[in-house]
């Protein structure tokens, strides 16, 4: 891919010559797009230049379908907002340059996103501060005024009372299209969700929709970038809070959310930062919803592998373990409201 990247960057950086691409490496994981890191060095107006980049490239198949224009728009909207995000550089909706659509952004250097590294002894003195900042940033995302930004150019907001239905309709359809066998637990959860809709939110906000440990870049100095905006939309902010609490993200298996914070502490921090009061019944609805959404994502990966659309080992893993585990999560989520 080095020659193609060199040609593309030369065409995008005026006056650049001698473009050299190095350290091309695919970052493991990723639910919707291939993520690659690479470095570029070139001459520009007689001076040597270099920059580190991230490439987000559409794969043949993925765990979920998402629109790169929307993801790109959310990143662009949050630049200079106070919410830390990497800067976007270029987007291509055609396949001519690299064989598939993609976008390129700056790479924030020296950070981790690993879900277990934050458990290392190095992070013990700062783990609580990172957890606090995680939920303060969530509140900042929800407080962000998206009107007049790139988001409004590509997305229409739902009415407050339609937030839950639009999301549930979407993810139920994903299950309909991708289940390889009957999903009685997911169907029971969907019936419960439809019979017990949450109250409308006081405000329609940006929803990151995959906000959790593993989707922000951190060091011992704090959080430096929120990433993976591929499912972002406008909706009920409690969707983010509930998703960050999902049992699948309890990496330490001791009940701490994301392996770093207890739920009540996270709620308190979020309420203080947002100036809002969390409706616990509504939060429970979004908790059950999140378990259904998670199952829809795992089923999509399993279907992609079975249909021969991908040979990625992440996809059969979802069908082997995560689907069964997600059934257990759904049952426990429904039981918490009994």
Image (cartoon, helix red, strand yellow):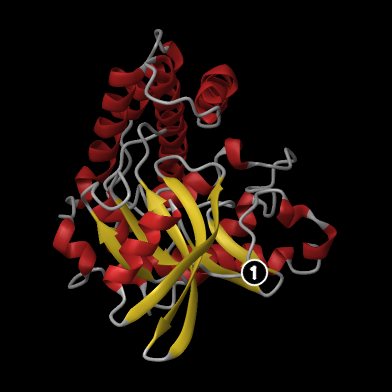
Query: Which residue occupies 28% across, 80% down?
Result: 14
Percent x, y of residue 272: 52, 70
Q: Residue furthest front?
A: 18
**Residue beneath disc 1:** 110
Q: Is residue 77 above or below residue 297?
A: below
Q: 49 or 52: which is nearer to us? A: 49
Query: Which residue occupies 43% across, 82% down?
Result: 43
Looking at the image, can residue 20 be seen? yes
Q: 39 or 199: which is nearer to us? A: 39
Q: Residue furthest top?
A: 181
Image quadrant assignment for residue 198: top left
Q: Is residue 4 above or below residue 48?
A: above
Q: Is residue 37 above or below residue 107?
A: above
Tally the numbered discs. 1
Image quadrant assignment for residue 121: bottom right
Local SS, label 1: loop
Percent x, y of residue 147: 20, 70
Looking at the image, can residue 77 be seen? no
Within 10 angstroms of label 1, few (less than 14), some, or many (20 or more) residues? few
């Amino acid at each position: 891919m080095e020659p193609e990247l060199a040609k593309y960057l030369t065409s995008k950086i005026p006056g650049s010559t001698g473009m050299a691409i190095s350290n091309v490496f695919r970052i493991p994981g990723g639910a919707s797009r291939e993520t690659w890191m690479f470095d570029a060095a070139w001459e520009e107006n007689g001076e040597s230049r270099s920059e580190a980049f991230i490439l987000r490239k559409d794969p043949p198949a993925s765990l979920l379908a998402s629109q790169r224009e929307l993801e790109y728009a959310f990143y662009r909207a949050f630049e200079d907002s106070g919410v830390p995000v990497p800067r976007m550089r270029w987007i291509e909706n055609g396949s001519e340059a690299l064989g598939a659509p993609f976008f390129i952004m700056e790479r924030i250097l020296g950070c981790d996103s690993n879900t277990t590294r934050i458990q290392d002894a190095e992070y013990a003195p700062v783990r609580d501060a990172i957890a606090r900042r995680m939920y303060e940033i969530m509140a900042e995302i929800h407080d962000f005024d998206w009107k007049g930004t790139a988001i409004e150019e590509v997305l229409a907001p739902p009415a407050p009372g339609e937030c839950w239905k639009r999301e549930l309709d979407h993810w139920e359809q994903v299950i309909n299209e991708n289940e390889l066998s009957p999903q009685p637990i997911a169907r029971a959860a969907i019936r419960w969700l439809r019979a017990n809709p949450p109250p409308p939110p006081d405000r329609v906000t940006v929803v990151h929709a995959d906000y959790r440990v593993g989707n922000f870049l951190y060091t011992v100095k704090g959080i430096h970038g929120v990433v993976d905006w591929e499912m972002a939309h406008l909706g009920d902010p409690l969707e983010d809070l509930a998703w960050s609490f999902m049992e699948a993200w309890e990496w330490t298996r001791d009940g701490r959310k994301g392996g770093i914070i207890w739920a009540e502490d996270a709620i308190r921090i979020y309420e203080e930062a947002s100036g809002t009061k969390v409706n616990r019944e509504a939060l429970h609805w979004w908790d059950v919803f999140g378990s259904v959404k998670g199952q829809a994502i795992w089923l999509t990966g399993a279907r992609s592998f079975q249909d021969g659309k991908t040979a990625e080992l992440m996809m059969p893993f979802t069908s082997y373990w995560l689907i069964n585990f997600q059934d257990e999560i759904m049952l426990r989520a429904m039981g918490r409201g009994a």
